[in-house]
Image (cartoon, rainbow, N blue to C red):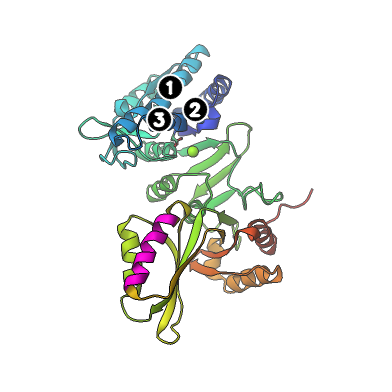
């Protein structure tokens, strides 16, 4: 008998009809002879609705109270799913995060899981029950309810799978797997049979929204076999796992895009030691995350310094930079919100030279100007004008031969 953790996201439990469909699916896996622990999100839109209610009252609600509020979304779905399962004759029992005792630190709204007590769950499984656990929530040492950050149900599922040494962790969502590119942009994008943790991590941090980044880190650390599947149709989904010899050795696994960044440049800063720190220090102090950084070679003892931040942080960063520029005696600060980052990702890159030049050449052929470049061992990212988003993604997708065979 295999233990499987199944996680269903908001759209998969978005209505009573959907909850009944999930119950059917859970029962089928149960009947196939597996022990099933289910983790659910709140019904789609519910967490946003709750946040909206709080913001009608206060611009800065206490983080502790927000967690008490937000955790109710998942409490509704665990109960409804168990009621549906029971109604079908399948014994099931629900638990909130604190009832399981998913112990977290006390960082409200972004808590980290420290420990999971699974003895009640194990006892229930032994009695033949399906166990349904609320995603996204836990409890701190003092008994305060905590939540794990948006999209945190993925992490609950992976953490449970790790703690209970589950055979696999299945993440059911509204897409049937991980694709070579966003199918809304590239109609011939292909579902990947498997992808490595490393690649998935890059894709998640580069803008793919299929899985919460932290859940992939967790899966990698604890060797949890993760599978992304659709709850709307049957299919094998995409397995996220360790790199191994037998995996299809594609050079590139996918093209990712991110429209959430903006770029800032300090023009004409004196070219001397400490400049990067004087510019980025105040940015970091303001808790603004910096992604790509480019510093040019100095000319006439000055240099230009460019970096990207999340678009939401743009105005704040610009304000800070204007002050810094004055103190440093820089010529000016310029900025651009109309950019996108396009990346090619693949572990095959490690053993093959020439991917970058192939990528730059393909973009050049289409007349797409590259503003910034950054690389890691398994990805190359470029920043281009946002008007080239679709053309850029499609061009690279076909350049690296990622298309589906046409029927
Ligand atoms: N309900 C939470 C959210 O909307 C957690 C989740 O869905 O994973 O972010
Ligand atoms: Mg989600």
Q: Which residue is mark 1?
A: 76
The quarter of the picture where residue 123 lies is top left
Q: Secondary structure at mark 3?
A: helix
Q: Which residue is mark 2?
A: 43
Q: Nearer the viewer, mark 3 or mark 2?
A: 3
In the picture, measured across the screen, residue 323 lies left or right of residue 105, that is right
The quarter of the picture where residue 331 lies is bottom left
> How far across and down, in percent of the image, does residue 166 sit?
42, 37
Residue at 57% over, 24% down: 18
> How far across and down, in percent of the image, does residue 264 sit?
46, 65
Q: Nearer the viewer, residue 17 or 22?
A: 17
Q: Which residues are magenta?
A: 315-327
Asked if the residue at tag 1 contacts the one at tag 3, i.e. Cβ–Cβ closer than 8 Å, the answer is no
Asked if the residue at tag 1 contacts the one at tag 2, i.e. Cβ–Cβ closer than 8 Å, the answer is yes
Q: Is residue 392 visible?
A: yes
Furthest residue in direction bottom, as rendered: 300
Q: Is residue 2 visible?
A: no
How far is disc 3 from disc 1 in space, using C-alphas? 22 Å
For ligand 1, tell me if the residue under mark 2 lies within 8 Å: no
Q: Which residue is mark 3?
A: 56
Q: Nearer the viewer, residue 115 or 292?
A: 292
In the picture, measured across the screen, residue 386 lies left or right of residue 114, that is right
Q: Residues within 10 Å of mark 3 (few under 14, many from 20)?
A: few
> How far across and down, in percent of the image, does residue 60 sit?
33, 37
Q: Nearer the viewer, residue 238 or 269?
A: 269
Q: Nearer the viewer, residue 387 or 153?
A: 387
Q: Earlier in the sequence, mark 3 or mark 2?
A: 2
For ligand 1, tell me if the residue under mark 1 lies within 8 Å: no
């Amino acid at each position: 008998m295999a233990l499987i953790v199944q996680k269903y996201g908001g759209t998969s439990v978005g209505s009573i009809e959907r909850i009944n469909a999930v119950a059917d699916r859970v029962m089928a896996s149960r009947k196939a002879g597996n022990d099933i622990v289910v983790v659910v999100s709140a019904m789609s839109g519910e967490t946003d609705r709750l946040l909206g209610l709080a913001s009608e009252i206060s611009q800065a609600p206490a983080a502790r109270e927000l967690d008490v509020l937000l955790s109710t979304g998942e409490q509704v779905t665990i109960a409804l799913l168990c009621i549906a399962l029971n109604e079908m004759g399948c014994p099931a029992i629900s638990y909130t995060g604190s009832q399981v005792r998913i112990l977290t630190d006390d960082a409200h709204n972004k808590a980290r899981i420290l420990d999971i007590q699974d003895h009640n769950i194990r006892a229930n499984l032994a009695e033949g029950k399906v166990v349904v656990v609320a995603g996204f929530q836990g409890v701190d040492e003092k008994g305060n309810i905590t939540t794990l950050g948006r999209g945190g149900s993925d992490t609950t599922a992976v953490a449970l799978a790790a703690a209970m040494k589950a055979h696999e962790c299945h993440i059911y969502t509204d897409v049937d797997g991980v694709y070579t590119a966003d199918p809304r942009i590239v109609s011939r994008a292909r579902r990947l049979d498997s992808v490595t943790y490393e690649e998935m991590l890059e894709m998640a941090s580069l803008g793919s929204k299929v899985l919460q980044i932290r859940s992939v880190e967790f899966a990698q650390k604890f060797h949890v076999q993760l599978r992304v599947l659709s709850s709307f149709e049957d299919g094998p989904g995409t397995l996220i796992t360790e790199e191994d010899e037998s995996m299809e050795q594609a050079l590139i696994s996918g093209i990712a895009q991110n429209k959430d960044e903006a770029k800032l440049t300090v023009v004409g800063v004196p070219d001397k030691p400490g400049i990067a720190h004087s510019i980025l220090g105040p940015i970091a102090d303001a808790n603004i995350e910096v992604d790509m950084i480019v510093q040019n070679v100095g000319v006439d003892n000055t240099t230009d310094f460019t970096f990207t931040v999340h678009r939401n942080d743009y105005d704040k960063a610009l304000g800070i930079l204007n002050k810094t520029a004055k103190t440093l005696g820089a010529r000016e600060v310029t900025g651009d919100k109309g950019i996108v980052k396009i990346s090619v990702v693949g572990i095959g890159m490690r053993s093959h030279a020439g991917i970058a030049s192939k990528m730059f050449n393909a973009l050049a052929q289409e007349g797409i100007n590259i503003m910034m470049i950054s690389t890691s061992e398994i990805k190359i990212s470029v920043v281009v004008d946002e008007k080239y988003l679709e053309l850029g993604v499609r061009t690279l997708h076909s350049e690296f031969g990622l298309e589906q065979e046409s029927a």
